Image (spheres, rainbow, N blue to C red):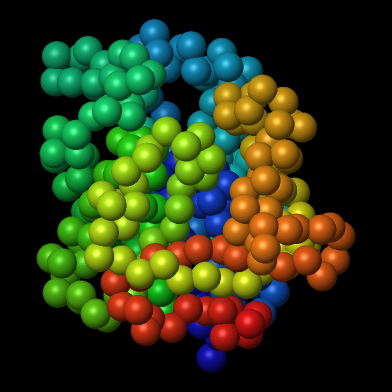
Amino acid sequence: MTQHYLFISAHLDDAILSCGDYIHALIQNNYQVTIATVFTGMGTDLSMLARILHKKFGLGMDTMDVRRQEDIHAAEALGAAVIHLNLLECIYRKNKDGSPVYSKLQNLFVAEVGSEHEVIEEIVSVLSEQIIFENFAGVFVPLGIGRHIDHCLVRESTERYRLRAGTDGQIRLMYYEDLPYLCFNQDITWRTELAAGLHEQRIKLQYWDLKAKINAVLKYGSQLSLLWPSRTSMLKQMEKHARGVAPQSKLHPPEGSDYFFKVYTADVNEPIPVSEIRT
């Protein structure tokens, strides 16, 4: 029976930006992959911050429709399935008085997870209603590098769901590094704070896995200019990151070049799919 793995993503691009090469490797080795994205709903009566970001996206009121289609196309390029859970991401969330929860972009990276306890409960509820975790051989979630509030909420909610469901040990939870935030080198304490007690495990990938990831990322046309000043800078950042985790820090395209993808597990002996194949 083919093993099935779940990647939980905060936004419509996070899992593929962070793990697209590993997802490609899994699928090429006959594993099934589903990407569940939590925040895919569209807000109304947009805040100034949301309007500014929509302008950067180059989209109108159909923003989330377009982004969901981009996500479907990106996942299809890798061979993965998608689930959209349709909760509201941070720029659309409102306080009870109707004011935006976040009015400045920098606030998204300094907010405390505990300040969004209602959103945590909402995520836990939708996870329990729409995902049968027992159907998956393993579940990958973001570490939260960069401290984006939505990424941190997804991690906290998944951990809380597992604890409440009493399936600790049955749900194999693994953590991935958040890209491109890792590459910005601004979260200097993530290893001691976000990966404390976890064990780094390395999976050997090959250059065509990176090429497949880049091809999938290019499907997110509305997001590229928000994250990078140009397509060239995106390509350089992704290759630089891969080069940084390549043997002897060398990555020589095209075919045959190896580099490592990192995951983090609570158990140092946790079996990681594909790692036993590409060693």
Is 118 drawn above or below residue 248 in the view shown?
Answer: above
The quadrant where residue 101 appears: top left
Can residue 110 be seen?
yes
Can residue 37 be seen?
no
Q: Position of residue 119 (x, y in %)?
A: 21, 40
Of residue 76 and residue 195, the one placed in the foreground of this image is 195
Relative to 97, 106 lies left or right: right
Q: Residue furthest top?
A: 48
Quarter of the image with the C terminus in it: bottom right
Is 70 drawn above or below residue 61 in the view shown?
Answer: below
Taking the spot 53% from the left edge, 91% from the top edge, the residue there is 1
The quadrant where residue 129 appears: bottom left
Q: Residue furthest bottom?
A: 1
Taking the spot 62% from the left edge, 53% from the top edge, the residue there is 244
Relative to 186, 90 lies left or right: left
Q: Position of residue 68 (x, y in %)?
A: 55, 40
